Image (cartoon, coloured by chain):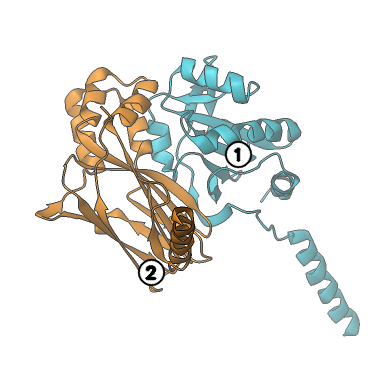
Chain colours: A orange, B cyan
Amino acid sequence: MYQGSYRITRLLLCFIISSLPMSSLQAAKPDRRVYENEVLKLSVTPRTPQQMAAFYEGRGFPSEAIALTRTACFFTIGIHNKSRDILWLDTANWKFHTTTGPLKRISRDEWKHRWQELELPLSYQSTFRWTLLPARLDFQPDEREGGNITLPRTDKPFSLRATFATGVDKQGPRIDVLMEDLRCAEDKP
Amino acid sequence: MKKLLLGIMLFVCSHSLLAEDLSPPKGVIAITPRPAPPLLLQNMDGEKFDLSKAGKQWAFVHFWASWCGPCRREMPTIQVLIAELAGSPLTFAIVNTAESDDTVFSFLASVAPEINSLMDYDGLVTEAWQPRGLPSTYLVDPQGTIRYVVIGGQAWHSREYQDFLRQLTRNGK
């Protein structure tokens, strides 16, 4: 009896999950979030301070620079333009909000200022820049690009609202993405 | 009159055949031509390379870094491409962005040991070219104008890409 009801529950869950619409937010992995429709696939993966430290340490970054990366909240973004038209990325319209107010993204300029204060050699500054998501890009058909976005660390959940224009002249249908309950990843104890 | 018309038709048709409209393979995008930024670097042996003095021929300019996954997959195909197109009027400038000799040496030794990369140690040359991301490839014509950009990593060892580059350099446009 117990096994029978378990099987029915599993079947029910499978039915519910399989009937979700495609243009939906998917929990592909516990941490990774994915938005996908016929035009855009957007993935957002939180990275722990340790993951980012290990990456930059592997690139030979000095310890002071790595310490600075630990103060930020990193997300690796993946974007795929699945359409035959242009898809426009502009991170200036990406808005992050906690329940108490906006969360301002750490911009490229701000990182540049931080690295200059630290007198970080240009090679490391360059490498860091190239690991960031482009601020603006006209995604060509089938183009995939990615990179990191960074926020001040917070233990509060927050939302991301991102808008993508489409079409050569940006006059095509707009894509609005809302992801809620995002969280900065923490190192495992 | 008929002979004149026939002559004109033959001229137009032959000119069209000779023009050979190039159809770029997947990922190769024809762009609004713009002058290529300077590219003056040296490789790990200290040999200097100046794109402006590379001779009146097409150039394949490629930016990469060892930490980028698509770069790792693409580099062996570029090695094959260079070997297959040896002797053709195509200059190769393979540029590492902002890494050390040790990093580049270790990386290339494992994925493409025949390639001797140019070294953009401080990343400033790469910055000037403004790639869309890494890896990025540009095709620069004999007049020093960027005519094509390549989106992401491609299978340069395949016949489709090699034929395109052969045709490009053969036309000499």
Q: Secondary structure at mark 2?
A: loop
> Can you see residue A40?
no
Q: Please state the horizontal and vertical placement of residue B33, each as a whole percent of the image.
A: 51, 54
| A84, A69: nearer the viewer | A69
Q: Quadrant of residue B117?
A: top right
Q: Is residue B146 above or below residue A83?
A: above
**Measured Cα–Cα span from mark 2 to mark 1:** 33 Å
Residue B142 marker = none
- The residue carrying pointer 2 sits among few (fewer than 14), some (14 to 19) or many (20 or more) residues within 10 Å by Cα, namely some
- In the rendering, which numbered label is found on residue B59? 1
Left or right placement of residue A135 versus residue A37 in this view: left
Badge 1 amino acid: Ala
Q: Is residue B32 visible?
A: yes
Q: Residue at x 50, y 39 (%)?
A: B135
**Looking at this view, is A41 or A158 the one in front?**
A158
* B154 versus B82 height, above or below: below
Residue drawn where x is 37% and y is 31% of the image = A127
User: Residue pushed farthest bottom?
Assistant: B1
Q: Amino acid at mark 2?
A: Lys
Relative image position of residue B39 (x, y in whole percent): 48, 33
Res A170 label: 2
Residue in the picture at 38% in, 69% down? A170
Q: Residue furthest left?
A: A100
In this rendering, would B172 be left or right of B9? left
